Image (tube, grey):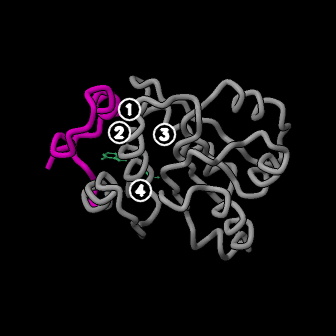
Amino acid sequence: MSFSQFQFHPNIESGIRDLGYTSPTPIQLQSIPIILQNRDLMGLAQTGTGKTAAFVLPILQRLTAPSRKRIRALIVAPTRELAEQIHQDIQDLGRHTKTRSVTIYGGVGKGSQIGGLRLGAEIAVACPGRLLDLMEQGVVDLSHVEVLVLDEADRMFDMGFLPDIRKIIKRIPAER
Ligand code: AMP
């Protein structure tokens, strides 16, 4: 099995090649076709099995269609370390695309995150608390979100983020 079966944009295939991935992992094989069909999906796989690329690659594919500088994919993660890791994977896999990603999490100044949002990005990787904070300040517009990912959803719920996630979901389009 190779990545060519998914018919990703050549710029995305170049990113995959640069990282040295030769064949999709099981979670990628099972989930990428479903996400490419714009269907909802719940996936369960251990860390280290390639689950980040399983959602990042179809998101990059969707975002090759023009409509730039507004957030079209929102990835919510429980910790800033995970958010940074996902952001890095997006940058690596999307290095030949024009898609931009920003991170939003607490424990650091808001200035550079607000600056990044003002410059415009199509993907936001966010922890719930700071995201709600910036939404309340009116600096994050989620009204164009087409794709929502809850990464490590089970852990987020264990950590008590469910009320925050409900508030976030209320602010994104119902059709996603
Ligand atoms: P993850 O489960 O998303 O944390 O990914 C674990 C590691 O596997 C990361 O270092 C990825 O860069 C790598 N990886 C993801 N997909 C593949 C693949 N198809 N082939 C080889 N390595 C991969």
Residue ID for mark 1: 64
Residue occupied by mark 2: 61
Can you tell me whether the CB of the residue at mark 3 lies under 8 Å from the nearest atom of ligand 1?
A: yes
Contact? badges 4 and 1 (CB < 8 Å)? no
Read off the residue under disc 3: 89
Circles 2 and 4: CB atoms closer than 8 Å: no
For label 2, the crowd category at 10 Å Cα-Cα, with few meaning under 14, some 14 to 19 and many 20 or more, is many
Q: CA distance from mark 1 to mark 2?
A: 5 Å
Residue at 17%, 40% (x, y): give it: 4
Q: Is residue 163 magenta?
A: no
Query: What residue is pinned by disc 4?
Result: 51
Which tag is nearer the camera, tag 2 or tag 4? 2
* SS state under label 3: helix
Start-end of magenta stretch: 1-26
Q: Give me the residue at 36% from left, 46% from top.
A: 58
Amino acid type of the residue tagged 3 in the rendering: Asp
Query: Would you say the beta carbon of the disc 2 residue lies within 8 angstroms of ligand 1?
Result: no
Real-space Cα separation, disc 3 to disc 2, in angstroms: 14 Å
Gap between marks 3 and 1, in whole Å?
17 Å
How many angstroms separate mark 4 from mark 1 (CA)? 21 Å
Q: Nearer the viewer, residue 156 or 35?
A: 35
Q: Is residue 144 above or below residue 14?
A: below
Residue 3 in picture, x, y percent from top left = 21, 43
